[in-house]
């Protein structure tokens, strides 16, 4: 319809939030926007990861490529990633790592001098930038610092040595999984469950118990006093349709009606630790807004070309 506006104003409500986990509701939007946000969080929020390794000495049992691959997968704190430049776009260096705008340099020097096996871990990586260091999982895992010394890179025996220089750069998960800031991002439609009270009251208590137990998850329960079937956790429903099949087998189709709310989604986000889960969501929203602005600018450009014809294209160098 001419002049109709389809503009929406999505709303977010935080349900649970920790450093590496956040659960929130996204309302008043559609599945395309929810899925776009999910994909941006997975592969388009930039982080920092080791991308170039120069090995000086390696007498360990692992070859150079194996160690380089392990180094690349070590998560690095990436709070400043959004303000860094991509190395391919940096005009202040030649990509050798000596640049504060697009890279961070790491050094590792380890040699085993005793008969006891030496664990070389992420704690042994020395960073040129104190804000970009290997993620410390010792607190979240509940280990004492003496017991948990970081992610093991290689083990050395007496006389074995490892010396290397590594360059960490900004990147996104679309280029390589090592730059993905999210361990997992999922969303589901918020279910709306309606019980037909008249049909439910026609069931015996045993039939009600059988109906409640047919759900693989704890969605329904029976009130011990009134013996009424109630919804205790609608979000536990996994759209398996088991209760619907049970109702039909009991000869009571329509006993319960379950439908997803088309404009309401429940997100679960787990971070790898490189940035806080809440910051991951905020960064993803910022990137998505930029993408939508770019699309809108592109549409404006096309409209200008339609209005001004060859002149508009010529002015843009077309």
Image: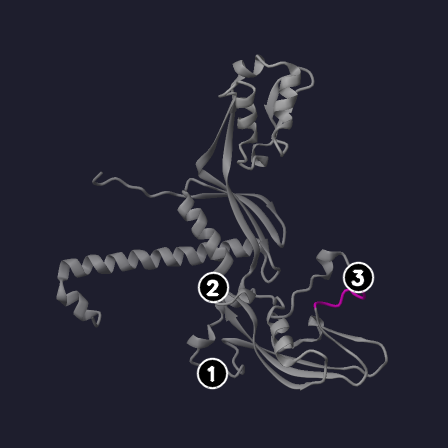
Which quarter of the rendering shows the C terminus? bottom left
Q: Position of residue 45 (x, y in %)?
A: 49, 61
Is 208 on the left or on the right of 93, as rendered?
Answer: right
- Identified at 19% across, 59% down, the residue is 304
First-in-chain label (3 vs 1): 1
Image quarter for residue 14? top right
Q: Position of residue 277 (x, y in %)?
A: 57, 54
First-in-chain label (2 vs 1): 1
- Magenta region, residue range: 144-151
Residue 313 in the image: above or below residue 167: above
First-in-chain label (2 vs 3): 3
Which residue is label 1 attached to? 93
Of residues 66 and 10, the one nearer the viewer is: 66
Mark 1 Cα-neighbour bin, 10 Å: few <14, some 14–19, many ≥20 = some
Which residue is label 3 attached to? 144
Residue 147 on the magenta segment? yes
Q: CA distance from mark 2 to mark 1?
A: 24 Å
Q: Secondary structure at mark 1?
A: loop
Question: Disc 2 vs disc 3: which is toward the camera?
Answer: 2
Residue 242 in the image: above or below residue 80: above
Q: Position of residue 156 (x, y in %)?
A: 76, 78
Which residue is label 2 attached to? 174
Labelled pair 3, 1 in contact (Cβ < 8 Å): no
Which quarter of the rendering shows the N terminus? top left
């Amino acid at each position: 319809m001419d002049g109709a506006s389809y503009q929406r104003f999505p709303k977010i409500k935080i349900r649970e939030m920790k450093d590496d986990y956040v659960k929130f509701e996204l309302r008043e939007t559609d599945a395309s926007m929810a899925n776009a946000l999910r994909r941006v969080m997975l592969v388009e929020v930039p982080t920092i990861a080791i991308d170039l390794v120069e090995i000086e000495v390696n007498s360990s049992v692992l070859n150079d490529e194996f160690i380089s691959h392990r180094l690349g997968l070590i998560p690095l704190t990436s709070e400043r990633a959004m303000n860094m430049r991509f190395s391919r776009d940096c005009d202040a260096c030649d990509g050798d790592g000596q640049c504060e705008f697009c890279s961070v340099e790491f050094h590792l020097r380890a040699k085993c001098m005793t008969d006891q096996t030496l664990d070389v871990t992420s704690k042994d990586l020395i960073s040129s930038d104190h804000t970009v260091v290997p993620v410390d999982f010792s607190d979240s895992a509940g280990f004492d610092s003496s017991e948990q010394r970081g992610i093991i890179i290689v083990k050395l025996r007496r006389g074995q040595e490892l010396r290397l220089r590594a360059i960490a750069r900004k990147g996104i998960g679309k280029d390589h999984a090592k730059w993905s800031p999210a361990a997992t991002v999922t969303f589901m439609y918020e279910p709306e469950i309606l019980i037909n009270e008249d049909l439910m009251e026609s069931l015996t208590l045993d039939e009600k118990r059988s109906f409640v137990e047919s759900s693989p998850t704890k969605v329904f329960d029976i009130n011990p006093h009134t013996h009424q079937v109630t919804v205790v956790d609608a979000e536990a429903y996994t759209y398996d349709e088991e209760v619907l099949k049970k109702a039909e087998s009991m000869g009571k189709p329509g006993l319960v009606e379950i439908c997803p709310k088309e404009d309401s989604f429940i997100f679960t986000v787990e971070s790898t630790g490189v940035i806080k889960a809440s910051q991951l969501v905020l960064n993803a929203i910022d990137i998505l807004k930029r993408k939508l602005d770019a699309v809108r600018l592109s549409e404006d450009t096309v409209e200008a070309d339609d209005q001004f014809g060859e002149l508009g294209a010529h002015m843009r160098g077309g």
